[in-house]
Amino acid sequence: MRLQLALNVRDLDAAIDFYTRMFATEPAKVRPGYANFAVEDPPLKLVLFEDRDADASAFHHLNHLGVETTTSAEVTTAEERLTSRGVETTGVDDTVCCFARKTETWVESPDGAAWEWYVKTGDAEADEPGAVPATASGPPDLLLTAPAPAPGPTRGGPGREEVCGLRSGLAR
């Protein structure tokens, strides 16, 4: 059993390059406007659909993606592998995010999809040190990870309780 994730991408070649380096796996199938990967570790069927007309807002429905590991050492190993392949990361940090204590690193795809490699090391309350308040307005610089209590708020808008991970720029 594995999770399938289908993503729309603006540039299929750039996406194939990024995900090949990120998962250390070549695509299983590439066709015009389409590619898929059968990633063994973590178990994942990754499907890419090219949409050259998509803009950066194509991922607004997506909060972030993640690979949950079982140890902090696995996060560090993943971060080392990613940086050795030229994928920019945030570095490995211990943090409080998503109501959990975690060791994590983040990367961003060519289309702006943020990926978190992490291990949960404990539970946390939203108001513990390290939780970052949501921004009030404007385009999000941070990804939101706690769900809004009421339907309809925009990313970074009112009603968001916590943010983690970077939307762009990767530097913390």
Image (cartoon, grey):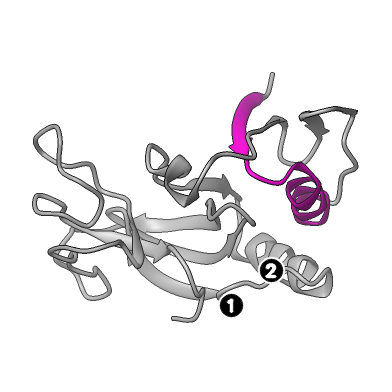
Circle 2 SS class: helix
Q: Position of residue 88 (x, y in %)?
A: 66, 73
Q: Which residue occupies the foreground of this view, 133 or 111?
A: 111
CA separation in Å, label 1 and label 2? 7 Å
Q: Amino acid at mark 2?
A: Glu
Coordinates of residue 134 in the picture (x, y in percent): 18, 63
Quadrant containing the C terminus is bottom left
- Magenta segment boundaries in residue numbering: 3-23
Name the residue located 78 percent from the left edge and 49 percent from the top edge.
23
The residue lying toward the viewer, choosing from 13 and 122, is: 13
Q: Residue furthest front?
A: 53
Q: Residue at 67% of width from left, 70% of height from top?
A: 76
Q: Quadrant of residue 138?
A: bottom left
The amino acid sitting under disc 1 is: Gly
Q: Is residue 112 above or below residue 72?
A: above
Quarter assignment of residue 162:
bottom left
Whether residues under marks 1 and 2 lie with C-beta atoms below 8 angstroms apart, the answer is yes
Secondary structure of the residue carrying numbered label 1: loop
The tag earlier along the polypeptide, 1 or 2, is 2
Q: Is residue 101 above or below residue 150?
A: below
Question: Residue at label 1?
Answer: 91
Of the pair 62 and 131, the residue shown nearer to us:
62
Identify the residue under disc 2: 79
